[in-house]
Amino acid sequence: MARPKAKAPARRYHISGKSVVTIAGRDFYLGPHDSPESIARYAALIAVYQQNGFSVPDGFELASLDPQVAMMLGGTVQPTQQADAPVLVRHLTASYREVAKTKYAGSHAEKHRIEQVCDELDKHDGDLQAIEYGPLKMQQQRQRWITSGKARVYCNRLTNLIIRIWKHAVSQELVTEPEWRRLKAVEPLREGQTAAPETEDVKPVAIEVVRSTAAELSPVLKAMVRIHAGTGMRPAELCRMRPCDIDRSGTEWIYRPEKHKTAKRGKKKAVPIVGDAREALTDYMNRPADAYCFSPRESVQWFRAKQAASRTTPKNQGNRPGTNRKANPKKQPGEQYTPTSYRQSIQRAAKRANVEHWTPYQLRHTAGTLIREALGVEAAQALLGHSRASMTEHYAKQTEAKAIEAAKVAPKL
Protein backbone atom coordinates (compact mmCIF):
# COMPACT_ATOMS: atom_id res chain seq x y z
CA MET A 1 0.00 0.00 0.00
CA ALA A 2 1.38 3.38 -1.03
CA ARG A 3 2.27 5.82 1.70
CA PRO A 4 -0.34 8.62 1.90
CA LYS A 5 0.82 12.07 0.89
CA ALA A 6 1.44 14.63 3.66
CA LYS A 7 -1.30 17.23 3.97
CA ALA A 8 1.35 19.88 4.64
CA PRO A 9 4.99 18.95 3.83
CA ALA A 10 7.36 20.28 6.47
CA ARG A 11 9.16 23.59 6.09
CA ARG A 12 12.81 23.18 7.13
CA TYR A 13 16.13 25.00 7.32
CA HIS A 14 18.47 24.81 4.32
CA ILE A 15 22.24 25.33 4.45
CA SER A 16 21.79 28.45 2.32
CA GLY A 17 19.98 30.10 5.23
CA LYS A 18 16.57 29.82 3.56
CA SER A 19 13.43 27.91 4.40
CA VAL A 20 12.78 25.07 1.99
CA VAL A 21 9.88 22.66 1.42
CA THR A 22 10.00 19.61 -0.86
CA ILE A 23 6.95 18.67 -2.91
CA ALA A 24 7.00 15.75 -5.35
CA GLY A 25 10.79 15.73 -5.31
CA ARG A 26 11.03 19.44 -6.10
CA ASP A 27 12.58 21.92 -3.65
CA PHE A 28 10.88 25.30 -3.20
CA TYR A 29 13.06 27.94 -1.49
CA LEU A 30 10.76 30.30 0.42
CA GLY A 31 13.12 33.07 1.59
CA PRO A 32 15.19 33.72 4.75
CA HIS A 33 14.47 30.99 7.28
CA ASP A 34 11.67 31.78 9.76
CA SER A 35 11.14 35.26 8.26
CA PRO A 36 7.55 36.54 7.87
CA GLU A 37 8.08 36.40 4.10
CA SER A 38 9.05 32.70 4.13
CA ILE A 39 6.15 31.79 6.43
CA ALA A 40 3.62 33.67 4.25
CA ARG A 41 5.02 32.12 1.07
CA TYR A 42 4.81 28.67 2.69
CA ALA A 43 1.17 29.21 3.64
CA ALA A 44 0.29 30.29 0.09
CA LEU A 45 2.16 27.35 -1.43
CA ILE A 46 0.47 24.81 0.85
CA ALA A 47 -2.93 26.25 -0.10
CA VAL A 48 -2.15 25.64 -3.78
CA TYR A 49 -0.82 22.17 -2.95
CA GLN A 50 -3.97 21.14 -1.07
CA GLN A 51 -6.38 22.64 -3.61
CA ASN A 52 -4.63 20.70 -6.40
CA GLY A 53 -5.10 17.30 -4.74
CA PHE A 54 -1.84 17.27 -2.78
CA SER A 55 0.30 18.27 -5.75
CA VAL A 56 1.30 21.38 -7.68
CA PRO A 57 0.09 22.21 -11.22
CA ASP A 58 2.36 21.45 -14.14
CA GLY A 59 4.65 24.36 -14.90
CA PHE A 60 3.97 25.98 -11.51
CA GLU A 61 6.44 28.67 -10.46
CA LEU A 62 6.76 30.00 -6.92
CA ALA A 63 7.04 33.57 -8.22
CA SER A 64 3.36 33.40 -9.22
CA LEU A 65 2.50 33.60 -5.50
CA ASP A 66 4.36 36.88 -4.90
CA PRO A 67 1.28 39.16 -5.37
CA GLN A 68 -0.67 37.04 -2.86
CA VAL A 69 2.24 37.04 -0.40
CA ALA A 70 2.58 40.83 -0.75
CA MET A 71 -1.10 41.23 0.17
CA MET A 72 -0.64 39.00 3.22
CA LEU A 73 2.33 41.09 4.39
CA GLY A 74 0.84 44.45 3.44
CA GLY A 75 3.66 45.43 1.07
CA THR A 76 6.00 44.25 -1.66
CA VAL A 77 8.21 41.18 -1.40
CA GLN A 78 11.54 40.30 -2.97
CA PRO A 79 11.57 37.29 -5.30
CA THR A 80 13.28 34.35 -3.61
CA GLN A 81 16.46 32.90 -5.08
CA GLN A 82 16.57 29.17 -5.63
CA ALA A 83 19.41 26.68 -5.23
CA ASP A 84 22.04 28.77 -6.99
CA ALA A 85 22.58 31.05 -3.95
CA PRO A 86 26.29 31.28 -2.93
CA VAL A 87 27.54 29.42 0.14
CA LEU A 88 28.55 31.86 2.87
CA VAL A 89 30.75 31.41 5.93
CA ARG A 90 27.67 31.42 8.17
CA HIS A 91 26.34 28.43 6.22
CA LEU A 92 29.48 26.46 7.09
CA THR A 93 29.21 27.34 10.77
CA ALA A 94 25.49 26.45 10.80
CA SER A 95 26.31 23.04 9.31
CA TYR A 96 29.06 22.39 11.88
CA ARG A 97 26.86 23.49 14.79
CA GLU A 98 24.36 20.81 13.78
CA VAL A 99 26.91 17.99 13.59
CA ALA A 100 28.48 19.10 16.90
CA LYS A 101 25.19 18.55 18.75
CA THR A 102 25.62 14.81 18.25
CA LYS A 103 29.37 14.39 17.87
CA TYR A 104 30.24 16.29 21.05
CA ALA A 105 27.08 15.66 23.04
CA GLY A 106 29.08 14.47 26.05
CA SER A 107 31.67 17.27 26.07
CA HIS A 108 30.41 20.57 27.43
CA ALA A 109 33.84 22.20 27.04
CA GLU A 110 34.18 21.25 23.37
CA LYS A 111 30.64 22.40 22.57
CA HIS A 112 31.42 25.72 24.25
CA ARG A 113 34.55 26.16 22.11
CA ILE A 114 32.61 25.35 18.94
CA GLU A 115 29.90 27.89 19.78
CA GLN A 116 32.57 30.48 20.59
CA VAL A 117 34.39 30.01 17.27
CA CYS A 118 31.20 29.88 15.19
CA ASP A 119 29.89 33.06 16.86
CA GLU A 120 33.15 34.86 16.07
CA LEU A 121 33.12 33.73 12.43
CA ASP A 122 29.47 34.76 12.02
CA LYS A 123 30.13 38.16 13.61
CA HIS A 124 33.16 39.16 11.53
CA ASP A 125 32.93 37.14 8.29
CA GLY A 126 29.49 35.54 8.27
CA ASP A 127 28.34 37.24 5.05
CA LEU A 128 31.58 36.50 3.22
CA GLN A 129 31.49 33.80 0.56
CA ALA A 130 33.14 30.65 1.93
CA ILE A 131 35.48 30.39 -1.06
CA GLU A 132 36.87 33.86 -0.20
CA TYR A 133 37.81 32.94 3.38
CA GLY A 134 41.53 32.21 3.30
CA PRO A 135 44.67 32.15 5.45
CA LEU A 136 44.78 35.94 5.94
CA LYS A 137 41.19 36.03 7.23
CA MET A 138 41.94 33.20 9.65
CA GLN A 139 45.09 34.95 10.90
CA GLN A 140 43.07 38.12 11.45
CA GLN A 141 40.65 36.14 13.59
CA ARG A 142 43.53 34.58 15.51
CA GLN A 143 44.94 38.05 16.16
CA ARG A 144 41.60 39.09 17.68
CA TRP A 145 41.90 36.23 20.15
CA ILE A 146 45.50 37.21 20.96
CA THR A 147 44.44 40.84 21.50
CA SER A 148 41.67 39.71 23.85
CA GLY A 149 44.28 38.02 26.06
CA LYS A 150 43.78 34.36 25.21
CA ALA A 151 46.80 32.10 25.74
CA ARG A 152 48.96 30.86 22.87
CA VAL A 153 47.95 27.20 23.23
CA TYR A 154 44.26 28.11 23.39
CA CYS A 155 44.56 30.35 20.30
CA ASN A 156 46.08 27.42 18.42
CA ARG A 157 43.23 25.19 19.54
CA LEU A 158 40.59 27.66 18.35
CA THR A 159 42.41 28.16 15.03
CA ASN A 160 42.52 24.39 14.48
CA LEU A 161 38.79 24.35 15.09
CA ILE A 162 38.28 26.71 12.13
CA ILE A 163 40.23 24.26 9.96
CA ARG A 164 38.00 21.43 11.22
CA ILE A 165 34.90 23.42 10.22
CA TRP A 166 36.26 23.75 6.69
CA LYS A 167 37.18 20.05 6.63
CA HIS A 168 33.59 19.16 7.52
CA ALA A 169 32.40 21.55 4.80
CA VAL A 170 34.48 19.61 2.26
CA SER A 171 32.74 16.39 3.32
CA GLN A 172 29.38 18.10 2.74
CA GLU A 173 30.48 19.46 -0.66
CA LEU A 174 30.01 23.04 0.49
CA VAL A 175 33.63 23.96 -0.39
CA THR A 176 36.38 22.15 -2.27
CA GLU A 177 39.44 20.46 -0.80
CA PRO A 178 41.95 23.19 -1.88
CA GLU A 179 40.00 25.78 0.18
CA TRP A 180 40.47 23.62 3.27
CA ARG A 181 44.13 22.84 2.58
CA ARG A 182 45.15 26.48 2.18
CA LEU A 183 43.93 27.14 5.74
CA LYS A 184 46.21 24.32 6.92
CA ALA A 185 49.16 26.27 5.49
CA VAL A 186 48.99 28.67 8.45
CA GLU A 187 51.61 27.59 11.00
CA PRO A 188 50.60 27.41 14.68
CA LEU A 189 51.84 30.01 17.14
CA ARG A 190 55.22 29.02 18.59
CA GLU A 191 56.46 29.74 22.08
CA GLY A 192 58.54 32.92 22.18
CA GLN A 193 57.35 34.04 18.73
CA THR A 194 54.03 35.65 19.65
CA ALA A 195 52.56 38.20 22.03
CA ALA A 196 50.00 35.64 23.23
CA PRO A 197 50.63 34.73 26.89
CA GLU A 198 51.80 31.29 27.93
CA THR A 199 49.79 29.01 30.22
CA GLU A 200 51.42 27.57 33.30
CA ASP A 201 51.92 23.82 33.42
CA VAL A 202 49.67 21.92 35.81
CA LYS A 203 51.69 21.17 38.94
CA PRO A 204 51.11 18.40 41.50
CA VAL A 205 49.43 19.41 44.73
CA ALA A 206 51.06 18.45 48.04
CA ILE A 207 49.27 15.52 49.67
CA GLU A 208 49.17 17.42 52.99
CA VAL A 209 47.17 20.17 51.29
CA VAL A 210 44.75 17.52 50.02
CA ARG A 211 44.37 16.06 53.51
CA SER A 212 43.57 19.48 54.99
CA THR A 213 41.00 20.12 52.26
CA ALA A 214 39.39 16.70 52.69
CA ALA A 215 38.69 17.51 56.35
CA GLU A 216 36.28 20.23 55.15
CA LEU A 217 34.42 18.01 52.67
CA SER A 218 31.25 15.95 53.02
CA PRO A 219 31.72 12.17 53.35
CA VAL A 220 30.73 11.74 49.69
CA LEU A 221 33.29 14.23 48.40
CA LYS A 222 35.94 12.95 50.79
CA ALA A 223 35.47 9.45 49.37
CA MET A 224 35.77 10.85 45.85
CA VAL A 225 39.07 12.55 46.72
CA ARG A 226 40.41 9.35 48.29
CA ILE A 227 39.55 7.36 45.16
CA HIS A 228 40.94 10.11 42.94
CA ALA A 229 44.24 10.12 44.81
CA GLY A 230 44.47 6.34 44.69
CA THR A 231 43.73 5.97 40.97
CA GLY A 232 44.72 9.21 39.23
CA MET A 233 41.75 8.88 36.87
CA ARG A 234 40.26 11.87 35.07
CA PRO A 235 37.63 13.84 37.05
CA ALA A 236 34.90 13.04 34.48
CA GLU A 237 35.58 9.30 34.85
CA LEU A 238 35.34 9.57 38.62
CA CYS A 239 32.03 11.46 38.46
CA ARG A 240 30.47 8.86 36.10
CA MET A 241 31.34 5.86 38.28
CA ARG A 242 28.48 3.36 38.77
CA PRO A 243 28.37 -0.05 40.51
CA CYS A 244 27.69 -1.76 37.15
CA ASP A 245 31.00 -0.36 35.83
CA ILE A 246 33.04 -2.07 38.57
CA ASP A 247 34.33 -5.53 37.66
CA ARG A 248 34.50 -7.48 40.92
CA SER A 249 34.95 -10.94 39.39
CA GLY A 250 38.68 -11.12 40.19
CA THR A 251 40.83 -10.57 43.25
CA GLU A 252 41.09 -6.85 42.54
CA TRP A 253 38.28 -4.50 41.54
CA ILE A 254 38.61 -3.00 38.05
CA TYR A 255 36.65 0.08 37.00
CA ARG A 256 35.78 -0.04 33.31
CA PRO A 257 34.13 3.30 32.47
CA GLU A 258 31.40 3.21 29.85
CA LYS A 259 32.58 6.59 28.51
CA HIS A 260 36.08 8.02 28.59
CA LYS A 261 38.24 10.46 26.69
CA THR A 262 40.04 8.00 24.41
CA ALA A 263 37.10 5.67 23.66
CA LYS A 264 36.73 7.21 20.19
CA ARG A 265 40.22 5.87 19.35
CA GLY A 266 39.19 2.33 20.18
CA LYS A 267 41.12 2.33 23.45
CA LYS A 268 39.87 0.32 26.43
CA LYS A 269 40.06 1.87 29.87
CA ALA A 270 40.69 -0.17 33.00
CA VAL A 271 41.26 1.52 36.37
CA PRO A 272 42.25 -0.70 39.33
CA ILE A 273 40.44 0.09 42.59
CA VAL A 274 42.71 -1.21 45.36
CA GLY A 275 43.78 -0.34 48.87
CA ASP A 276 42.50 2.97 50.22
CA ALA A 277 40.51 3.68 47.05
CA ARG A 278 38.61 0.39 47.37
CA GLU A 279 37.91 1.01 51.05
CA ALA A 280 36.50 4.46 50.19
CA LEU A 281 34.30 3.09 47.40
CA THR A 282 32.84 0.13 49.30
CA ASP A 283 30.17 2.18 51.12
CA TYR A 284 28.91 3.60 47.81
CA MET A 285 28.32 0.28 46.05
CA ASN A 286 25.05 -0.39 47.95
CA ARG A 287 22.77 1.27 45.39
CA PRO A 288 21.13 0.34 42.07
CA ALA A 289 23.69 -0.97 39.58
CA ASP A 290 23.06 1.83 37.07
CA ALA A 291 22.90 4.64 39.66
CA TYR A 292 25.84 7.01 40.08
CA CYS A 293 27.98 6.22 43.10
CA PHE A 294 28.45 9.83 44.18
CA SER A 295 25.38 12.06 44.49
CA PRO A 296 25.36 15.80 45.30
CA ARG A 297 22.03 15.23 47.04
CA GLU A 298 23.74 13.17 49.73
CA SER A 299 26.29 15.94 50.25
CA VAL A 300 23.52 18.54 50.58
CA GLN A 301 21.68 16.36 53.12
CA TRP A 302 24.90 15.95 55.13
CA PHE A 303 25.61 19.70 55.15
CA ARG A 304 22.03 20.49 56.20
CA ALA A 305 22.17 17.96 59.02
CA LYS A 306 25.46 19.46 60.15
CA GLN A 307 24.01 22.99 60.10
CA ALA A 308 20.91 21.87 61.99
CA ALA A 309 23.02 20.19 64.68
CA SER A 310 25.08 23.34 65.23
CA ARG A 311 22.15 25.79 65.09
CA THR A 312 20.74 27.20 68.33
CA THR A 313 17.06 28.19 68.29
CA PRO A 314 16.01 30.87 70.83
CA LYS A 315 13.50 29.70 73.44
CA ASN A 316 10.94 32.33 72.44
CA GLN A 317 11.02 31.18 68.80
CA GLY A 318 8.69 28.34 68.02
CA ASN A 319 9.97 27.49 64.54
CA ARG A 320 12.14 24.42 64.14
CA PRO A 321 15.61 24.82 62.53
CA GLY A 322 15.43 24.88 58.77
CA THR A 323 11.70 25.61 58.47
CA ASN A 324 12.40 28.83 56.55
CA ARG A 325 13.95 26.82 53.70
CA LYS A 326 12.22 26.99 50.31
CA ALA A 327 9.96 24.01 49.71
CA ASN A 328 10.73 23.66 45.99
CA PRO A 329 13.80 25.71 45.04
CA LYS A 330 14.42 26.17 41.32
CA LYS A 331 17.95 24.77 41.53
CA GLN A 332 17.94 21.21 42.87
CA PRO A 333 21.01 19.02 43.51
CA GLY A 334 21.73 16.72 40.56
CA GLU A 335 22.00 12.94 40.46
CA GLN A 336 25.74 13.02 39.86
CA TYR A 337 28.70 15.33 40.27
CA THR A 338 30.14 16.91 37.15
CA PRO A 339 33.82 17.80 36.75
CA THR A 340 32.82 21.44 37.29
CA SER A 341 30.79 20.89 40.48
CA TYR A 342 33.48 18.53 41.82
CA ARG A 343 36.17 21.16 41.21
CA GLN A 344 34.09 23.94 42.76
CA SER A 345 33.41 21.87 45.89
CA ILE A 346 37.12 21.21 46.33
CA GLN A 347 38.06 24.85 45.85
CA ARG A 348 35.47 26.01 48.41
CA ALA A 349 36.73 23.43 50.90
CA ALA A 350 40.35 24.52 50.30
CA LYS A 351 39.31 28.09 51.05
CA ARG A 352 37.61 27.01 54.30
CA ALA A 353 40.72 25.03 55.24
CA ASN A 354 42.88 28.09 54.53
CA VAL A 355 45.20 26.20 52.19
CA GLU A 356 46.39 26.95 48.67
CA HIS A 357 43.99 26.85 45.73
CA TRP A 358 44.14 23.52 43.83
CA THR A 359 42.13 21.57 41.28
CA PRO A 360 41.28 17.87 40.73
CA TYR A 361 43.66 17.68 37.77
CA GLN A 362 46.52 18.63 40.10
CA LEU A 363 45.64 15.60 42.22
CA ARG A 364 45.85 13.45 39.06
CA HIS A 365 49.32 14.89 38.48
CA THR A 366 50.27 14.12 42.08
CA ALA A 367 49.30 10.47 41.65
CA GLY A 368 51.15 10.25 38.33
CA THR A 369 54.29 11.89 39.73
CA LEU A 370 54.53 9.63 42.79
CA ILE A 371 53.92 6.48 40.73
CA ARG A 372 56.50 7.50 38.16
CA GLU A 373 59.07 8.07 40.89
CA ALA A 374 58.29 4.70 42.49
CA LEU A 375 57.81 2.43 39.46
CA GLY A 376 58.81 4.38 36.35
CA VAL A 377 57.11 5.97 33.36
CA GLU A 378 55.54 2.79 32.00
CA ALA A 379 53.60 2.10 35.20
CA ALA A 380 52.36 5.69 35.38
CA GLN A 381 51.16 5.53 31.77
CA ALA A 382 49.35 2.26 32.45
CA LEU A 383 47.42 3.67 35.40
CA LEU A 384 46.70 7.12 33.97
CA GLY A 385 45.77 5.84 30.50
CA HIS A 386 48.26 7.96 28.60
CA SER A 387 49.17 5.32 25.95
CA ARG A 388 48.36 6.57 22.45
CA ALA A 389 47.99 3.19 20.69
CA SER A 390 44.83 1.08 20.94
CA MET A 391 45.25 -1.97 23.16
CA THR A 392 44.59 -5.52 22.06
CA GLU A 393 43.09 -7.90 24.61
CA HIS A 394 46.54 -9.40 25.21
CA TYR A 395 48.15 -6.05 25.97
CA ALA A 396 45.11 -4.98 28.01
CA LYS A 397 45.81 -7.81 30.46
CA GLN A 398 49.46 -6.84 30.74
CA THR A 399 48.52 -3.20 31.23
CA GLU A 400 45.98 -4.04 33.94
CA ALA A 401 48.62 -6.02 35.83
CA LYS A 402 51.03 -3.08 35.70
CA ALA A 403 48.24 -0.66 36.66
CA ILE A 404 47.30 -2.78 39.69
CA GLU A 405 50.92 -2.74 40.81
CA ALA A 406 50.99 1.05 40.31
CA ALA A 407 47.75 1.61 42.21
CA LYS A 408 49.12 -0.11 45.31
CA VAL A 409 51.72 2.63 45.73
CA ALA A 410 49.36 5.53 44.93
CA PRO A 411 49.05 8.25 47.61
CA LYS A 412 46.62 7.61 50.45
CA LEU A 413 44.86 10.24 52.52
Image (tube, rainbow, N blue to C red):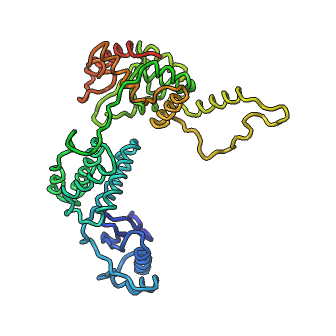
**Residue at x-position 38% and y-position 69%:** 33
The N terminus is located in which quarter? bottom left
Q: Is residue 287 left or right of residue 131?
A: right
Q: Is residue 321 above or below residue 402?
A: below
Residue 9, horizontal then vertical, whole percent: 41, 69
Q: In this view, does 130 lie above or below 203?
A: below
Residue 305, horizontal then vertical, whole percent: 67, 28
Q: In this view, does 38 lie to the left or right of 303?
A: left
Q: Which of 251 and 360 is in front in this view?
A: 360
Residue 53 shows up from this direction: no
Furthest residue in direction right, as rendered: 316
Residue 189, horizontal then vertical, whole percent: 21, 44
Residue 271 shows up from this direction: yes
Residue 72, horizontal then vertical, whole percent: 46, 83
**Residue at x-position 36% and y-position 44%:** 110
Q: Which of 1 and 200 is in front in this view?
A: 200
Q: In the rendered picture of this protein, how many numbered marks are placed on residues?
A: 0
Quarter of the image holding residue 409?
top left
Quarter of the image holding residue 173?
bottom left
